């Protein structure tokens, strides 16, 4: 049975509080500007209770986004590979005005407004997507693991308003860029020259290369184990003669690592080498595109290439594959 009480509200305005009590359910309370609004809300609650479909909104209404972010940071983020980066995104959400609002009060329009706000700030589309995806996962976690089944995920309501992501890069080495690159790398010195050859021969990610250890090399089988990958699945990479030749020229480090350079250092050195070689628009990650495309050009099938590169889906593999029409002419007959 619902009861209605009129009481003073903010600024001295009179408001109506609706209370719904039913055996077997927690008391439900909500405040409205008019009695008709209170009656409509209470009627809906009572009907849901009679049908046995009622789910309490109480916890979602009393939990602020700031509190949910803090819990997510403690319980969910530490298990992720990109935990350190994710904490920066959590900090951004925690500093926003929305953080002081309850989870139940955040609507699709709020997310749309946030997207536009970030656009005005000059944030890249990919950055906005990552921030929104984080919030979406927080809401889904609150619904499935934190007992807030009544909560609506507001991010689901604005799928069509997300900024369009740029198309995948299709940069490959052309003309005499590879010999120029290797010549400049030799002049630059250090490990960057062998690293360039290794990346093209193995299609490995920059982080995977930097984390290589001699103990993971099976020289007789010509296979390198990558125990920890971006996708979380270990894989074994077959090594070409050229790749083994790179390893044969490297000195053994006392710490067991194959390379002395860290991921950021690799990218910085590669950028400088491209400058010396006067090559524009090429990144170290583009060598993974180059290597993947070369595997297809050697005649390997989709599953064979995926087993080497570690791509989880064919769609992602397609993004990293850029076959040149000129190289396919001879196979057409």
Image (cartoon, grey):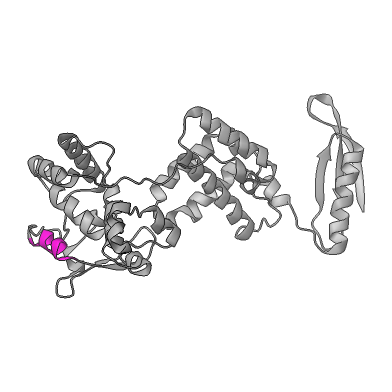
Instruction: Give the percent coordinates (x, y) of residue 294.
Output: 27, 58
Residue 214 in magenta stretch = no
Outermost bottom residue:
220
Measuring 14% from the left and 61% from the top, which residue is drawn there? 242
Split into 4 quadrants, where in the image is the C terminus?
A: bottom left
246 magenta-colored: yes
Q: Is residue 25 visible?
A: yes
Query: Residue at horizontal 92%, vertical 39%?
Result: 36
Tell me, yes or no, if residue 285 can be seen here.
no
Q: Residue at x 41, y 63 (%)?
A: 312
Quadrant where the N terminus sits is: bottom right
Specify the segment rendered in magenta: 240-248
Look at 67% across and 37% down and name the residue there: 109
Look at the picture and state if 271 lies above or below 78: above
Q: Main secondary structure of the magenta part?
A: helix
Describe residue 321's horizontal placement relative to residue 192 as left or right. Answer: right
Which image quadrant for residue 266? top left
- In the image, taking residue 324 as reference, residue 3 lies left or right, namely right
> On the image, which quarter does residue 99 sit in?
top right
**Residue 328, x across and y down, in percent:** 31, 58
In the image, 246 versus 48, the foreground residue is: 246
Give residue 12's position: percent from left, percent from top: 83, 25
Report the side of 231 relative to 201 (left or right).
Answer: right
């Amino acid at each position: 049975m619902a009861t209605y009480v009129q009481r003073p509200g903010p600024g001295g305005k009179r408001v109506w509080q609706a209370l719904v009590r039913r055996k077997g359910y927690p008391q439900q309370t909500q405040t409205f500007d008019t009695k008709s609004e209170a009656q409509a809300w209470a009627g809906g609650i009572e009907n849901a209770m009679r049908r046995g479909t009622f789910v309490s909104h109480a916890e979602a209404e009393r939990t602020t986004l700031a509190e949910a972010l803090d819990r997510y940071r403690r319980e969910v983020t530490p298990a992720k590979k990109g935990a350190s980066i994710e904490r920066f995104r959590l900090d951004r959400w925690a500093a926003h005005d929305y953080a002081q609002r309850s989870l139940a009060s955040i609507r699709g329009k709020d997310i749309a407004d946030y997207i536009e706000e970030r656009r005005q700030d000059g944030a890249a589309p990919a950055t906005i997507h990552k921030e929104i995806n984080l919030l979406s996962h927080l809401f889904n976690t609150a619904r499935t693991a934190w007992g807030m089944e009544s909560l609506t995920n507001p991010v689901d309501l604005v799928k069509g308003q997300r900024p369009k992501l740029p198309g995948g890069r299709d940069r490959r080495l052309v003309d005499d860029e590879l010999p120029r690159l290797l010549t400049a790398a030799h002049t630059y010195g250090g490990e960057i020259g062998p690293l360039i050859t290794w990346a093209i021969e193995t299609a490995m990610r920059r982080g995977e290369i930097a984390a290589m250890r001699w103990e993971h090399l099976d020289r007789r089988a010509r296979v390198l184990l990558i125990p920890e990958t971006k996708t979380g699945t270990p894989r074994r990479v077959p090594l070409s003669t050229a790749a083994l030749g790179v390893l044969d020229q490297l000195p053994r480090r006392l710490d067991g690592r194959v390379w002395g350079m860290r991921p950021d250092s690799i990218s910085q050195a590669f950028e400088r080498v491209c400058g010396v070689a006067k090559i524009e628009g090429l990144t170290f990650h583009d060598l993974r595109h180059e290597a993947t495309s070369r595997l297809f050009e050697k005649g390997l099938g989709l599953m064979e290439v995926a087993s080497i590169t570690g791509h989880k889906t064919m769609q992602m593999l397609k993004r990293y594959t850029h076959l040149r029409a000129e190289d396919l002419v001879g196979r057409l007959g």
